Amino acid sequence: MPETSSPAARQTDIERLTSTKTELRRELGLFDGINVVIGNTIGSGIFIAPAVVAATVAPQSGGMHLLVWLVGGILSMTGALSYAELGALMPRAGGHYVFLREGIADLAGFLYGWTILLVIATGSIAFVSITFATYLSYFIPISPAIIKLVAIIAILGLTWVNYIGVKMGSIVLNILTTLKVIALCALIAAGLAFAGYHRDNFLPVLTSDAVVDLSLVSTFMFALVSALFTYGGWQNIGFMAGELKQPKRDLPLSMVIGVTIVIIVYMAVNFVYANVLGVPAMGASRLVASDAMEGLWGTIGGSFVAMLIMLSSFGITNAIIMVSPRVYYAMAKDGLFLRQLAQVHPKYKTPSVALVFQAAWASIIVLVSDTFQQIMNYVVFMDWLFLAMAVYCIYVLRKKYPDAPRPYRAWGYPVTPALFILLSMLVVVNTMMRAPLESGIGIAIVLSGLPFYFGLKKRMGKQMTDTLPTLP
């Protein structure tokens, strides 16, 4: 990107970059922001992924299992500390998309938004809503067709809640997230109170015949992928920067406090799983949370976990529905997507068309979910590549605009951003090496946005360059 030619023009660019002007209503406070972070992170994954991690690190002990989750938490925190600087610098709706477009290029931002809309956000909405409906059948026998109908009703209902105002959506989010955390704390308390402490389930971290070589490191990194997917979602608070009352203060605080709470909860939950079941049994379990609680409370424990998974799934469905349309809205405002998605409801001041568009596509995915699940699995690892690219933008923007006001500066810069980028890329590369065919398909899906991008560019007659765009 070319340098600004004059001090006056440069100052104009800085003012545009850091502007807090928005069509949307700034109605969210710090508590709302923290719940956006937690609500978008803690979903049904914490009830499933621990078994995948345990199976991957076996026959090592629970100590190795917990180490994977601790490293995943530390990596997420280094990302949050870095990502928060970008959000405080550019407090606009769209978050991640904005960072990529400002720091790298239009195309980078577009491909991220394209992937979020096509697969990651809408696919997540579809599958967590199906998870919610599936666990409803634990209490009320319903057919697979009715499960899909319930999932679609949940999507449409939560979309309506967020359509009629960001405050209404945040109220529902706050209630569901608070209940979810309380229920997880109850699970943790039960595990600590009734299971005792089984020291042999945690020591040693490595078996006596283990060889610390590249193979073991690769296994650890592959296990880390499942943990990172479960930690994923903290970055979505950036999407809502245009609706935080004090984004330059509350966005960094929301990320740091929210990620800290998630790390504590995840470490405690995994300790309980490993303590009650042991790593071998965890790795062989399909429903690790249910097995752990049934071991403590019998059928009552199983019912409690089913209700907890329903609550978590419903909560994260609402959270993703709430935040993701801000990306499509920001893309459309910049002329990088369908213009209709930039419409803001005149009364409710929400990206109403983007919300409806998202609900429609997610509902279609519900109907074809049997074939879509594998497609989503191919693509999700790319989210960490986009995260690494976004954090890289810290270096770009500090060099380009060293005098721009930064309410928050990344703690540990330049080391923490570099650490996050390095570890994220190791995860991405390791995934590509361990699953080259699947990874290749995922990359192809992301790049499928190229024809749409260039077609849109040609049709609109708009010159999409790497220069900073003018805000409307």
Image: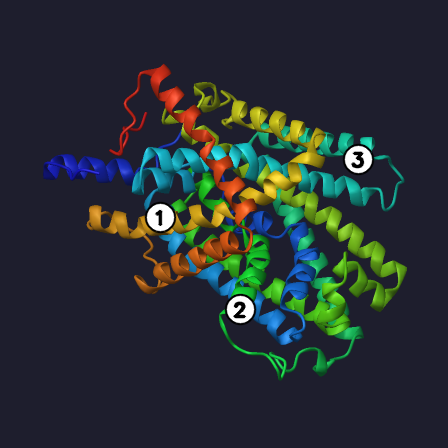
Tell me the tag on residue 215.
2
Query: Regarding mark 3 in the picture, which secondary structure is present there?
Result: helix
Which marked residue is nearer to the observer: mark 3 or mark 1?
Answer: 3
At horizontal 66% and vertical 44% (from top left) the residue drawn is: 315
**Amino acid type at image mark 1:** Leu
Which marked residue is nearer to the observer: mark 2 or mark 1?
Answer: 2
Res 459 → quadrant: top left
Q: Which of the two discs, 2 and 1, labels the residue nearer the N terminus? A: 1
At horizontal 31% and vertical 51% (from top left) the residue drawn is: 394
Query: Regarding mark 1 in the picture, which secondary structure is present there?
Result: helix
Image: 48 above or below 458: below
Query: Regarding mark 2 in the picture, which secondary structure is present there?
Result: helix
Question: Where is residue 440 drawn, in percent x and y?
Answer: 50, 43
Question: Where is residue 262 drawn, in percent x and y?
Answer: 57, 59
Quadrant assignment for the N terminus? top left
Q: Is residue 170 visible?
A: no
Tags 3 and 1 touching, CB below 8 Å: no
Q: Is residue 407 visible?
A: yes
Q: Is residue 126 left or right of residue 396?
A: right
Name the residue carrying label 3. Answer: 147
At horizontal 77% and vertical 29% (from top left) the residue drawn is: 149
**Amino acid type at image mark 2:** Ser
**Amino acid type at image mark 3:** Ile
Which marked residue is nearer to the observer: mark 3 or mark 2?
Answer: 2
